[in-house]
Image (tube, grey):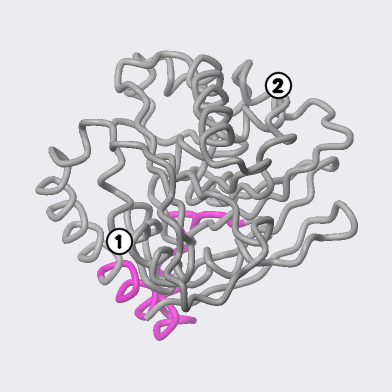
């Protein structure tokens, strides 16, 4: 599954040998870039609405004519945003999940001034305990975009969060670290997301008996992942499924309807019987 870049001197040769393939890639990249710019523009407009933490209350009871489902079948879903972002990035995903039966969904904000993933993970743990107490549920599901997925993974793998998190779905999360934007190293959070950082090495340590099931969506056009497969979960002790998404970039992962459908399927998967990594694919139009 290793993805390598094209060596510059070979580009003219590749263009002669595979002109249609490179043309298709260029068109896909242009489409993905245009979509990223459109999503960024929309998100800038929505961003102010997500700065304040949402009001939290006990979920409303379902209408009398709603078919009763086992409470264990659909635990609360926590949505955790990425670096320098807020809960507004999940407006469309939240609506999609609610329309398909998820009655309790919460979007959490962590401070943009956070300088340590470990501290953010501890705060997430307190939120999870509060949600479980308030809802009477034993476990939650978490969907984390980018840095949000790494915070949730640290909580699950290093702080005992696997007792509370049934399923962790990550979207474009640098599980093994990313080398993109070296000038951003001035920020300590960015340094923690680099390959070989202390935090990334902590996540490589043994995690025997981890009870959380991981599902990672990674894009073949994600400009923030270097290398691209950095967004895959690769750990011998973790039950993980890595799903490749073709045709969209980093910002589109939490808003694209095809990815939302994949997230719903991931949340509803049957419990796996053994720790093994699986790779699937998702192509979006």
Pick the residue in front: 284 or 129.
129
In the rendering, at what x and y percent does residue 191 appear?
A: 47, 19
Pick the residue in front: 235 or 154.
154
Q: Is residue 124 left or right of residue 209?
A: left
Q: Is residue 58 left or right of residue 280?
A: left
Whichever of callouts 1 and 2 sits on the residue coming sooner in the sequence is 1
In the rendering, at what x and y percent does residue 268 appear?
A: 64, 66
Occupied quadrant, residue 187: top left
Quadrant (top left, top right, bottom left, bottom right) of the C terminus: bottom left
Pick the residue in front: 252 or 59.
59
Occupied quadrant, residue 21: bottom left
**Magenta highlight range:** 3-30
Q: Is residue 29 magenta?
A: yes
Closer mark to the observer between disc 1 and disc 2: 1
User: Residue beneath label 1, please?
Assistant: 92
Q: Residue furthest left?
A: 45
User: Residue beneath label 2, please?
Assistant: 202
């Amino acid at each position: 599954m290793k993805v390598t870049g094209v060596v510059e001197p070979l580009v003219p040769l590749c263009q002669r040998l595979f002109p249609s393939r490179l043309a298709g890639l260029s068109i896909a990249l242009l489409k993905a870039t245009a979509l990223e710019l459109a999503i960024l523009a929309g998100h800038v407009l929505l961003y102010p609405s997500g700065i304040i933490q949402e009001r939290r209350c006990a979920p409303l009871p379902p209408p009398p004519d709603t078919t009763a489902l086992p409470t264990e079948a659909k635990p609360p879903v926590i949505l955790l945003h990425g670096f320098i972002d807020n809960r507004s990035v999940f407006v469309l995903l939240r609506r999609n999940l609610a329309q398909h039966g998820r009655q309790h969904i919460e979007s959490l904000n962590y401070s943009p001034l956070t300088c340590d993933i470990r501290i953010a993970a501890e705060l997430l743990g307190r939120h999870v305990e509060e949600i479980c107490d308030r809802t009477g549920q034993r476990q939650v599901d978490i969907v984390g975009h980018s840095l949000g997925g790494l915070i949730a993974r640290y909580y699950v793998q290093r702080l005992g969060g696997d007792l509370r998190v049934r399923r962790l779905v990550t979207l474009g999360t640098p599980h093994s670290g990313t080398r993109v934007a070296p000038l951003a190293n001035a920020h300590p959070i960015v340094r923690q997301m680099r390959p070989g950082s202390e935090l990334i090495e902590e996540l490589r340590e043994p995690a025997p008996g981890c009870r959380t099931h991981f599902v990672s969506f990674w894009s073949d056009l994600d400009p923030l992942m270097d290398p691209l497969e950095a967004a895959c979960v690769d750990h011998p002790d973790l039950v993980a499924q890595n799903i490749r998404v073709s045709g969209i970039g980093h910002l589109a992962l939490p808003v694209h309807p095809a990815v939302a459908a994949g997230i719903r399927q991931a949340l509803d998967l049957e419990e796996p019987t053994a720790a093994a990594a699986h790779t699937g694919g998702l192509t979006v139009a």
